[in-house]
Amino acid sequence: MRREGRFKGTKEKVVWSVEDKIWLDTLGKRDKVLLVISLFLNISIAMGPCASTAHAEATTVKAVDFEEYWLWAGVRTRPEIASAKTIYLLQGEVALEAPGGSISIKPQGGAQPAPHHQDLWIVYRVGTLEWSPDVFASLIRKYSNWKAVSGKIHGVQIDFDAGTRNLANYVEFLKSLRQQLPQGCKVSVTGLMDWAANANTDEINKLSGVVDEVVFQTYRKDKTVDDIDKYLRKMERIQIPFKIGLGEGALWDTSAPIARHQYFRGYVVFLRNAASTR
């Protein structure tokens, strides 16, 4: 802020003492500081809270603080896996063998049916919904093999990035899948945050009775997606059991209001080797 050496409307020269100059210089700096603080506060208010931290009390997601996990290929053995309540275990990927080729299940994850004390979901990544009878048969066979060993298996989880505009088609596919699965085999699906942001809630609720749960993925690698609070607010009308999927190493506030939702069933953490070494 610039101060003039003369007052308007007078020819009298103002003489500043040394003390005046020091005081004015200090005041000028103070004004600049106040201006910067004011601008910072205005910008902060306009922007709102940090979008990716999911509330002010967000902390780093650590596997040890949870009890349900996604276990993908290549994740090293850890104490959390042995003590887990529930494991979502990758078993394969449904995809084209080659451009123009047939659709099949490519084994992934490496784990073979064996006795286990954790509750289990076997997970299939899905790149296409154009399944042949052989694909359905292979998935059912794998479920039955796990069912035959000692330990509880809930069912099958389908990890498919269904676009919001294609939710209706996805629901029809899941109805077909459910009809072919053995009695007692439950169905879980992963859900995109885009569903919460852009889908009609009634479309999401059509999954009720078709699947037993939806696990919404709130992360990209070790980061919570931007504007997560906005997505969570739009989930208030969901009327189907759901869980929140967290990325290990991301930020999350477990006291967020979504945890008090009538249909909220807990958290599932995607395990990462890099996060476990922090």
Image: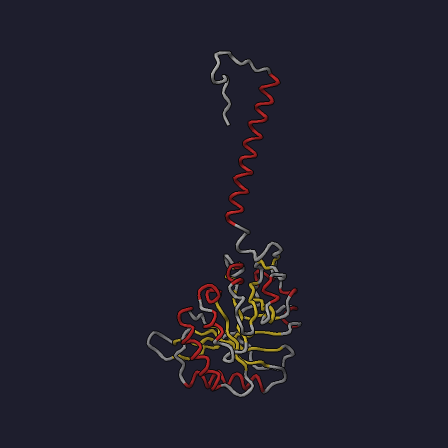
Relative to 93, 75 lies left or right: right
The colour scheme of the drawn protein is secondary structure
Compared with 132, 270 (above or below) is above
Compared with 14, 237 (above or below) is below
Quarter of the figure with residue 112: bottom right
Extreme front residue here? 9
- Residue 167 at what x, y percent from top left? 43, 73
Q: Nearer the viewer, residue 18 or 140?
A: 18
Compared with 22, 84 (above or below) is below
- Residue 129 at what x, y percent from top left? 41, 77
Q: Nearer the viewer, residue 232 or 122?
A: 232
Quarter of the figure with residue 113: bottom right
Extreme left residue here? 100
- Residue 70 at what x, y percent from top left? 56, 70
Q: Nearer the viewer, residue 24 or 104?
A: 24
Quarter of the figure with residue 75: bottom right
- Residue 89 at what x, y percent from top left? 55, 75
Quadrant containing the C terminus is bottom right
Q: In percent of the image, x 48 and y 14: which residue is there? A: 10
Q: In percent of the image, x 44 and y 67: which residue is there? A: 199
Q: In percent of the image, x 47 and y 73: which residue is there? A: 125
Count numbered badges in the picture.
0
